[in-house]
Image (spheres, grey):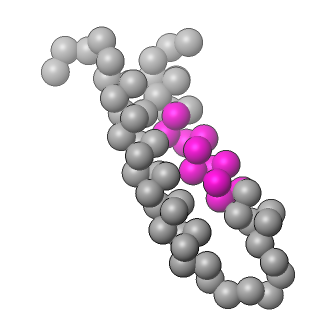
Amino acid sequence: MDNKLLGNFIIAFPTAAYVTYTIVMKEPNTGIDWTSIIIGGLIGMVSYAIGKKVKSKGEVE
């Protein structure tokens, strides 16, 4: 698999999977779950850093 495609997948998939999971498992008529927002942000930041590292692997800086 191409590094660029793999990097984009690593950036997008974990956050999308977590958001989908929280939407499906959320009970109806509940308020904003700030814990889920913070965890989603952390997952997004970590997956973005890993994805950028994978995308730039093999390129000269």
Quarter occupied by residue 13: top right
Answer above or below: position of 11 versus 41: above
**57 relative to 29 in the view: left or right:** left
Residue drawn 58% across and 69% down? 36
Q: Residue at coordinates 36% horizontally, 40% vertically from top-left?
A: 49
Magenta stretch in the rendered image: 10-20
x%, y% of residue 10?
52, 34
Residue with the most extreme right position: 28
Q: Where's residue 6, x and y in %? A: 52, 24
- Give 16 or 27, whichever is nearer the viewer: 27
Q: Residue furthest left?
A: 61
Q: Residue at coordinates 53% horizontally, 60% vertically from top-left?
A: 40
Q: Main secondary structure of the magenta part?
A: helix
The count of marks equals 0
Q: Is residue 5 left or right of residue 59?
A: right
The stretch drawn in magenta includes residue 18: yes
Residue 23 in magenta? no
The quarter of the image holding the N terminus is top right
The correct choice, above or below, for 8 with respect to 60 in the image is: below
Q: Position of residue 9 (x, y in %)?
A: 56, 32
Give the side of residue 49 with respect to residue 1, left or right: left
